[in-house]
Image: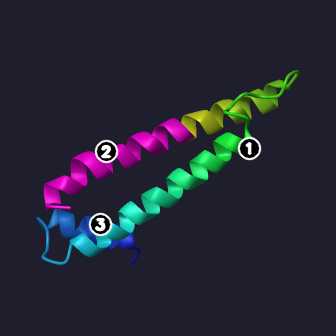
Amino acid sequence: MSNCQVLFSLMRRGGHPMIGQPIAMMRHEHDNHGENLRALEALTDGGLPPAGACNTWRALYTGAHKLTDDLMEHIHLENNVLFPRFGA
């Protein structure tokens, strides 16, 4: 069972005295995702496709931007809305 599965199983049951550990692990994973997204932004020149990029490249950059936005929203909701409800 993954850390995420353990955590959400505990949350569905209303919490657990040891819930802080899996939440801390998830926050650490979120930090790693943030580092990876910053690397992606650097590799893609801030998300700007190269001059003269074909439609396929433009779609790739658009998709990468959408992934970044969606993941950042997901991380924000977990870190700032969900986890505090369980004291972490």
The circle on residue 43 is: 1
Q: Which of the 4 image quadrants contains residue 88?
A: bottom left
In whole angstroms, how far apart are the C-alphas of marks 2 and 1?
26 Å
Crowdedness near tag 3: few (<14), some (14–19) or many (≥20) residues, C-alpha within 10 Å: many
Q: How many marks?
A: 3
Depth-wise, is mark 2 or mark 1 nearer the camera?
1
Q: Image height check: is 19 above or below 45?
A: below
Badge 3 amino acid: Ile
For the N terminus, give its image quadrant: bottom left
Badge 1 amino acid: Leu
Q: Tell me which numbered mark, 3 or 2, is placed earlier along the sequence.
A: 3
Q: Position of residue 86 (x, y in %)?
A: 15, 60
- Tag 2 secondary structure: helix
Most foreground residue, 28 or 74: 28
Q: Position of residue 58 (x, y in %)?
A: 75, 27
| Residue under numbered circle 3 | 23
